[in-house]
Image: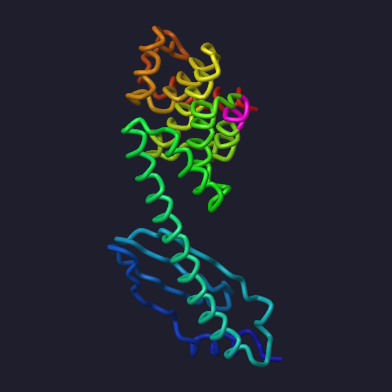
């Protein structure tokens, strides 16, 4: 059986990594697969865009450290992971592109007031991406408004909210707030004014400048109160306590 020092020597003969650029749409990504060596027996593949990691995958290979064909198996693992990560990422980008195309079509229809056709497109999108919370949220909202299936539409909107990460990533506030906007509109369609107001206010706790949420509350003749009255609505304490409270209420 080879000693660890022998394995270190062998590891040095393994190519340090695979590097390639791929272009998807109008974006170019750099894909790099690295060998961690015997002190950190793992193969890690990173995908970079403009210097930032946008996707990664790590696989442990401690189980082959003492294998006679260690070199060949490690090279094969690196090669297979490098290719599989590119395939996985390419599929994800293509799916996101298709989702964007669905929503571009939906937005145009909504601007024209064609809610019925927008619902049809969302139904098709949901069949293709049944676990996508964004599609689910809009579909539930229009289900209540167009088909007047209020309870079903509200439940779908609530299920979409449950799929969200409980921690709001900076920059994603407008996206998360939209889920409460859709839920509130579904409640309004069902004549549940107070629940609609609560949903709109929960959205404003995440994104206090959301124009759609503010517009809905103005139409209803109300405005949310800050969680801590003696602090301004824009205060970070009010904002993040509001997020936590809205999550707890949803449980």
On the rendered structure, is 109 left or right of 75? left
Start and end of the magenta stretch? Answer: 151-155
The quadrant holding residue 96 is bottom left
Please name the residue shown 58% across and 24% down the image.
150
Please name the residue shown 48% across and 77% down the image.
83
Q: Is residue 41 above or below residue 101?
A: below
The quadrant holding residue 60 is bottom right
The quadrant holding residue 42 is bottom right
Q: Is residue 152 magenta?
A: yes
- Assign the magenta stretch its main secondary structure: helix
Please name the residue shown 37% across and 64% down the image.
48
On the rendered structure, is 165 left or right of 67? left
What is the x, y in percent for residue 243?
50, 26
Please name the residue shown 36% across and 45% down the image.
105
Tell me the quarter of the image containing the N terminus. bottom right
Nearest the viewer among 16 and 84 is: 84
What is the x, y in percent for residue 230?
41, 8
The residue sitting at the right extreme is: 1
What is the x, y in percent for residue 128?
54, 53
Tell me the quarter of the image containing the C terminus. top right
What is the x, y in percent for residue 99?
43, 51
On the rendered structure, is 98 left or right of 148? left
Q: Is residue 143 above or below residue 27?
A: above
Q: Is residue 154 magenta?
A: yes
Nearest the viewer among 73 and 153 is: 153
Nearest the viewer among 210 and 19 is: 210
């Amino acid at each position: 059986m080879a000693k660890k020092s022998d394995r270190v020597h062998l590891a040095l003969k393994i190519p340090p990594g695979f590097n390639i650029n791929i272009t998807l749409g109008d974006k170019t990504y750099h894909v790099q697969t690295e060998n961690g060596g015997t002190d950190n027996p793992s193969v890690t593949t990173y995908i970079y865009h403009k210097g930032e990691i946008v996707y990664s995958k790590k696989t442990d290979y401690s189980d082959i450290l003492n294998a006679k064909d260690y070199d060949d198996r490690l090279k094969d693992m690196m090669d297979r992971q490098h290719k599989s990560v590119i395939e996985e990422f390419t599929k994800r980008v293509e799916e996101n592109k298709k989702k964007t195309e669905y929503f571009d079509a939906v937005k145009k229809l909504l601007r024209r007031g064609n809610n019925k056709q927008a619902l049809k497109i969302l139904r098709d999108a949901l069949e293709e991406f049944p676990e996508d919370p964004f599609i689910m949220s809009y579909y539930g909202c229009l289900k209540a408004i167009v088909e007047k299936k209020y309870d079903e539409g509200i439940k779908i909107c609530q299920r979409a909210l449950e799929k969200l990460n409980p921690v709001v990533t900076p920059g994603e506030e407008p996206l998360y707030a939209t889920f409460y906007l859709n839920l509130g509109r579904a409640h309004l369609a069902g004549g549940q004014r107070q629940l609609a107001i609560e949903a709109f206010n929960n959205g404003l706790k995440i994104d206090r400048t959301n124009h759609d949420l503010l517009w809905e509350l103005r139409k209803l003749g109300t405005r949310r109160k800050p969680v801590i009255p003696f602090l301004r609505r824009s205060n970070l304490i009010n904002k993040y306590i509001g997020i936590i409270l809205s999550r707890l209420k949803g449980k």
